[in-house]
Image: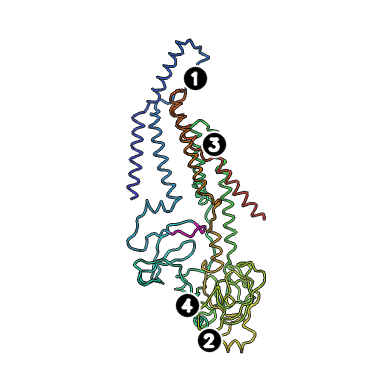
């Protein structure tokens, strides 16, 4: 399909180029005939030399104006096709891909998010040895493909895609009777869920700059500037291009600064005590996986962290359920509440966990700050209401918690992901704007046709100049200063927000 599309464009370019070659010099000859005719008329009318209008002859190799227009049209259409594949994922999927009859590794999935939650994307399918299923990563979230019969409907004929499930709705007994993970189980789960890190990979300046320059408004502005250059406004074109490059570079710097601020919002790795392999060991928080048993304390343990780790012992590194002890946590970073919340251990009941509902009082969320964490005040009452556990006492008298969500699947990770990928439209009147542009374009087509007709009848301008004027009339539907004004408005708003 790609080769067919490429062949069509090559054929169009070849026809237009052949048209230009076959009519080479025709514009020069037509202009000479017009000048001779005008000179004869001036001679018969007795026109003085100082009253004669000067004429500019086109190049001797200049082709027919309609041949030039056809070549310009094919090149513009090819460039627009290439850019449309970058701007519209659906268009790219239609022209470069075909529907798959089977789901295999290496195939691509077209993901369309909910409104105002980011842009669509084409992501490749990969095979996970741990789950023995195909999956993909979209907006830093892990998804897996379920074969027909493995999903919610056993009678379905097609598979389904779901977010990688964390143990957030298991029976309460599973959490209270947990005995920790072995080293092999932890490695398999780490391969499945990934590292417990909230880091956004920062693109380089040139990557962002290239993406910014290929946006629709910037491309339109560069196109208009080049058309003005064809109308002998070279100085204006150079100034426009300089302003475009300067303003877009400013937007890129602001974007990189915002992404760095977003990256700093995530909690960095630090050392924590984890119960693995039937013993308490010290691990980095980046190694935590769902199912781990960890100790949460308010002070740093005596063991020093490695130099490249940031010590943050009072920050909850992941979403977890307390199964032993008591804690007081400040959830201001997630909910905005200034008052600390009391947290106590989970009690044995015959039901499943409700993480965001009735069991929220037993859960600690990633990014929140621990004000106080202890083993519990009334140990006899605690042991009487909870089943016996083989997990020994925590080494630093902190509370014992069961990890349920890590990385971008945690509460803080979902918040960062929403901030990074959410997009709100500037205006809700999109339909009205499109209608207005269509009306203006219709009027511009009428005006351009009139200019071309009258100009050809008068003969005071060459057809090449008339075609350039017609293109300028059509591009005047969108004001040429609009992209610059938009970039200035965005930069001004970002600077105002950074000072606030």
Relative to residue 375, is residue 407 depicted above or below? above
* Mark with earlier residue (2, 3): 3
Whether residue 1 sits left or right of residue 430 in the image: it is left
In the image, which is nearer the foreground, mark 4 or mark 3? 3
Whether residue 105 sits left or right of residue 259 in the image: it is left
Badges 2 and 3: C-beta atoms under 8 Å apart? no
Residue 341 locus on image (x, y percent): 64, 74
Relative to residue 106, is residue 12 depicted above or below? above
In the image, which is nearer the foreground, mark 2 or mark 4? 2
* Mark with earlier residue (2, 1): 1
Secondary structure beneath label 1: loop
Label 2 environment density (alpha carbons within 10 Å; few <14, some 14–19, many ≥20): few
* In the foreground, 352 or 241: 352
Q: Residue at x 54, y 52 (%)?
A: 428
The residue at which mark 1 appears reads as: 54
In the image, which is nearer the foreground, mark 4 or mark 1? 1
The residue at which mark 2 appears reads as: 389
Residue 131 locus on image (x, y percent): 41, 72
Marks 2 and 4, how far apart at CA = 20 Å
Relative to residue 26, is residue 492 depicted above or below? below
Marks 2 and 3, how far apart at CA = 76 Å
Relative to residue 420, is residue 485 depicted above or below? above
Q: Which mark is residue 183?
A: 4
The residue at which mark 3 appears reads as: 238
* Mark with earlier residue (4, 1): 1
* In the foreground, 229 or 462: 462
Q: Which mark is residue 276?
A: none
- What range of the chain is rendered magenta? 111-118
Secondary structure beneath label 4: helix
Asked whether residue 145 is drawn in magenta, I would say no
């Amino acid at each position: 399909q790609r080769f067919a599309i490429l062949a069509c464009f090559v054929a169009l370019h070849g026809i237009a180029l052949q048209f230009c070659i076959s009519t080479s010099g025709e514009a020069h000859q037509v202009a000479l005939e017009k000048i001779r005719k005008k000179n004869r008329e001036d001679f018969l009318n007795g026109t003085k030399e100082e009253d004669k209008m000067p004429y500019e002859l086109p190049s001797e190799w200049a082709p027919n104006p309609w041949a030039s227009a056809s070549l310009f049209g094919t090149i513009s259409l090819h460039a627009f096709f290439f850019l449309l594949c970058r701007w519209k994922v659906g268009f790219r999927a239609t022209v470069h891909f075909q529907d798959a009859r089977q789901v295999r590794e290496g195939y691509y999935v077209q993901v369309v998010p909910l409104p105002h939650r980011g842009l669509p994307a084409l992501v490749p399918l990969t095979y996970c040895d741990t789950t023995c299923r195909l999956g993909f990563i979209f907006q830093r979230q892990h998804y897996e493909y379920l074969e027909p019969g493995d999903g919610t409907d056993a009678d379905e004929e097609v598979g389904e895609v779901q977010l990688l499930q964390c143990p957030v709705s298991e029976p309460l007994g599973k959490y209270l009777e947990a005995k920790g993970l072995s080293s092999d189980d932890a490695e398999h789960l780490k391969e499945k869920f990934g590292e417990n890190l909230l880091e956004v990979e920062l693109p380089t300046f040139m990557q962002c700059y290239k993406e910014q320059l290929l946006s629709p408004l910037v491309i339109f502005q560069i196109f208009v500037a080049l058309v003005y250059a064809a109308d002998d406004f070279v100085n204006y074109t150079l100034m426009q291009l300089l302003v475009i490059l300067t303003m877009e570079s400013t937007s890129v710097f602001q974007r990189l600064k915002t992404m760095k601020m977003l990256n700093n919002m995530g909690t960095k790795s630090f050392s924590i005590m984890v119960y693995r392999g039937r013993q308490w060991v010290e691990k980095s928080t980046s190694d935590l996986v769902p199912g781990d048993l960890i100790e949460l304390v308010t002070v740093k343990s005596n063991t020093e962290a490695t130099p490249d780790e940031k010590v943050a012992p009072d920050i909850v590194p992941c979403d977890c359920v307390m199964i032993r002890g008591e804690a007081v946590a400040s959830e201001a970073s997630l909910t905005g509440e200034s008052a600390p919340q009391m947290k106590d251990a989970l009690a044995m009941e015959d039901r499943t966990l409700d993480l965001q509902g009735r069991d929220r009082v037993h859960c600690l969320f990633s990014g929140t700050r621990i004000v106080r964490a202890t083993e519990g005040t009334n140990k006899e009452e605690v042991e009487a209401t909870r089943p016996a556990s083989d997990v020994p006492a925590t080494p630093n008298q902190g509370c014992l918690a069961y990890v349920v969500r890590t990385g971008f699947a945690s509460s803080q990770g979902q918040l960062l992901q929403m901030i990074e990928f959410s997009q709100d439209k500037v205006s809700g009147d999109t339909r009205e704007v499109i209608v207005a542009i269509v009306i203006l374009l219709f009027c511009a087509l009428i005006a351009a046709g009139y200019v071309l007709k009258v100009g050809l009848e008068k003969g005071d301008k060459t057809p090449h100049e008339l075609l350039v004027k017609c293109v300028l009339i059509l591009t005047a539907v969108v004001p040429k200063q609009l992209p610059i004004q938009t970039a200035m408005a965005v930069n001004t708003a970002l600077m105002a927000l950074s000072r606030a």
